[in-house]
Structures are given as C-alpha cells and as structure tokens.
C-alpha cells in the first residue's frame, strides 16, 4: 500500500513536471515567434531607412544640379552681351524656328557667327540643318547678318 501511495505521488509529480515542461515549451515557442517578428520588423525598418537615404541623396543631388543650372542661367542673363549676341538669329529673313533650333544645335547661336560663315562652312552645315545651300545663298543669310551688325550702335 505504501508503494502504491508512493507510486501515485510520483505519478502526480511526473504529471506536474510534464505540465511545467509543456508550459515552458509553449513560452519558448512564443518567445521564438516574437524574436522572428522583431527581426523581420528590424529588417523592414532598415530597408525603409536605406530607401529613404537613397531617395534623399538622389533628390538632393538633383536639387543641387538644378541650383547650379539656375545660377549659370542667371550669370549668363546678367553678363554684358556684345551687339552680335543681342540679336536673334530669327531676325535674318529665312531663319525660322526650325532653322534656329538646328543652328543652335550646331553651336551657331549669334548673328556674328552667321556673318562669319564662309561658303565651305555653309556647304558643310546646310545638310545638317536640312536646308539647301542655294536657299541660304539666295536668302543671303551672311549678308543680312553683316547688315544687322552694321546697324548696331
């Protein structure tokens, strides 16, 4: 009988121990899940910070570039111009918006430059601006440019 009672007591202790072990395992699983969630949240936060830093750096760089561009435009607008630079290429009969854009694309931006064109240069640039050499000569772009420059004070 005494052995039976001891066996019952040991069985009760064993059940308690098993129950405690199961409770501890459940707490451990819960803690591991919390660690996984926190790790995931930490990685997401780090990724967001990295993306923000990259976006901030990119926008700062583009803003800095825009400031430099605007400062250069301001400096160009406020610098004194020679008489040939004050004249528009479109004041020359035969040069409309399309030819003006094409000439600007070739680096010819002033009436002074047009006035200095030689026949060889006209023959070279005519196909580049999609104009015929005889039209440039007939409209007398070079002569008109020289007359415009002569009229300047």
Image (cartoon, grey):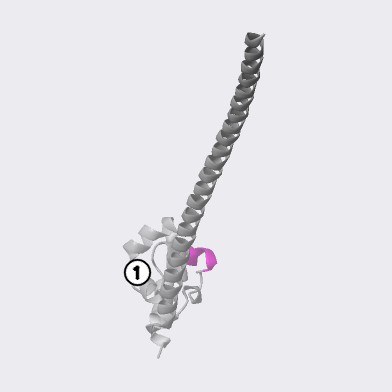
- Per the image, the residue denoted by label 1 is 117
Q: Where does the image place residue 45, in percent across and percent down from the top left? A: 53, 48
Q: Nearer the viewer, residue 107 or 66?
A: 66
Magenta stretch contains residue 54: no
Q: Tell me the residue at 61%/27% (across/down).
A: 20
Considering only vertical position in the picture, is 150 above or below 66? below
Determine which quarter of the picture holds residue 119.
bottom left
Considering only vertical position in the picture, is 129 above or below 5? below
Q: Report whether 125 appears left or right of 96.
A: left
Q: Tell me the residue at 61%/16% (across/down).
A: 10
Q: Which residues make up the magenta segment?
A: 96-102
Magenta stretch contains residue 101: yes
Task: Assign the N terminus to one quadrant of the image.
Answer: top right
Magenta segment, prevailing SS (helix, strand or loop) = helix
Instruction: Report crowding for label 1: few under 14, some 14 to 19, many 20 or more residues within 10 A (C-alpha).
Output: some
Determine which quarter of the picture holds residue 35.
top right
Q: Tell me the residue at 53%/50% (across/down).
A: 48
Q: Where does the image place residue 142, in percent across and percent down from the top left? A: 39, 73
Callout 1: helix, strand or loop? loop
């Amino acid at each position: 009988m005494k052995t039976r009672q001891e066996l019952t007591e040991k069985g009760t202790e064993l059940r308690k121990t098993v129950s405690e072990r199961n409770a501890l395992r459940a707490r451990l699983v819960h803690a591991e899940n919390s660690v996984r969630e926190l790790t995931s949240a930490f990685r997401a936060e780090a990724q967001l910070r990295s993306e923000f830093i990259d976006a901030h750096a990119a926008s700062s760089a583009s803003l800095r570039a825009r400031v430099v561009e605007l400062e250069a435009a301001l400096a160009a607008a406020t610098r004194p111009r020679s008489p040939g630079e004050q004249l528009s290429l479109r004041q020359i009969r035969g040069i409309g918006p399309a030819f003006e854009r094409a000439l600007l694309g070739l680096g010819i931006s002033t009436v002074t430059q047009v006035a200095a064109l030689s026949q060889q240069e006209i023959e070279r640039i005519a196909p580049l601006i999609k104009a015929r050499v005889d039209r440039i000569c007939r409209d007398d772009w070079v002569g008109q440019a020289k007359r415009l420059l002569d009229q300047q004070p």
